[in-house]
Image: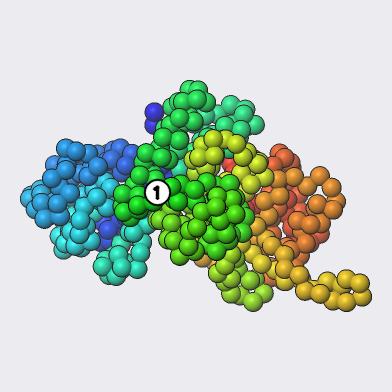
Amino acid sequence: MRILRPTYLSRLIAHKHNRLIKIITGIRRCGKSFLLFDFFRKHLHDEGVDDNHIIGISLDDRKYKELRNPDTCYEYVSSRLKDNRMHYVLLDEVQLMDEFEDVLNGFLHFDNADVYVTGSNARFLSTDIITEFRGRGDEIRIHPLSFAEFYEFRKGDWQDAWNEYSTFGGLPFVLQLASHEEKLRYLQNLFRQTYLRDIIDRNKIRNDSELDELVDLVASSIGSLTNPQKLTNTFQSRKNVRVSAPTVKQYLDYLRDAFLIEKALRYDIKGKKYINTPAKYYFEDIGLRNARLNFRQQEETHIMENIVFNELRNRGFAVDIGIVELREKQLGKYVTKRTEIDFIANKGSQRYYIQSAFAIPTEEKQAQEKRPLLGVADSFKKIIIVKENIMLRRDEYGITTMGLKEFLLNPDSLNL
């Protein structure tokens, strides 16, 4: 099965020969290796590059176990650079190599080597690694299939496709599985035997039951404000387990480093400053979240919110939670109230204020969703996304309301 991902391939092609290390990051099983070793290799062949000038090493393959040694890998690649023509070095799961930073920096000294690597944890993007690369690392972040990519392959009825995607998510291999039971089993095994096992082994976690419980707590509260102390209190009240707030924070960082979850901070729009705690967490793939909970908590409102968040991240936006302070008159007195905008999406000079509303069946609900948007004084676009497949409309205040289908399937939907 080949699911074309032209957006990511075009990014790789655009970054060729830029004298930087192309670092392809993302959650395991989201398609990084296929992008690099299938689509990109085919592009190189189409451009006339022969196999002698493509050096591909999959470090998670036992065949290349010896090359996990940094000196052995460096010598192997160096020995393959036979002439002055450009060689393309493709390294998969490079975090499995000790001292990979030194090895990659060493490759940069070769004028005839263009280097591409994949990795499945955020250590690539840490301050230490950026320092090691001295500004010569170039990240290309890959996500699971967007709904548009999923729908392009699956086709068929929109509602059926949405039901499937919002239940089983967008990991490419899921599309190959026929039954719901196979999909459930695959996602649950992947979560437990790959993602969590990676985290436990990499970070030498002794009490993995605490991590297990934390994953369940975060999965059951996507889109809700929380922080390590609140989660610590929940451990105590629900599980009668004592886990310190610093330990909870460390576990959350591990989950983020593995790209399983993403953190969205609150941003005070009028005060122009971040409010560090509490924050919200969203799952990188909604199918993994649902499978983790054995499909017990299928609140479509929160699931839709998570998918809207992921779509914005897929489109390259940085995403925050907006906080707007409004002064309103109550019982003859003016009081200040904090209201929330689900998402502030920023990319360069672009900014959008977005509400994920699911449904607005009454005028009261409509007013509730618009209220924080009306409290923002700037001229950036304000959008409400509803589940219903409606015709796009814009009110007298410039607030746009669009259907979820339009938002997900039209790559330029935010500019309509």
Q: Residue at x 57, y 71 (%)?
A: 274
Picture coordinates of residue 269, whole percent (x, y): 65, 71
Please give left or right for residue 234 compared with residue 245 in the image.
right
* Horizontal side of residue 321 vs 363, given as left or right: left
Residue denoted by label 1: 208
What's under tag 1, amino acid-wise?
Asp
In the displayed structure, does residue 150 sit left or right of residue 116?
A: right
| Residue 299 locus on image (x, y percent) | 65, 41
Q: Nearer the viewer, residue 138 or 196?
A: 196
Question: Where is residue 41 drawn, in percent x and y?
Answer: 27, 41
Rendered residue at 41%/35% (across/down): 189
Give the residue drawn at x 30%, y 37%.
Answer: 38
Pick whichever, 290 or 155, lies toward us.
Answer: 290
The image quadrant of residue 344 is bottom right
Q: Position of residue 291 (x, y in %)?
A: 51, 37
Q: Residue at x 37, y 57 (%)?
A: 122
Circle 1 sits in a helix, a strand or a loop, which is it?
A: helix
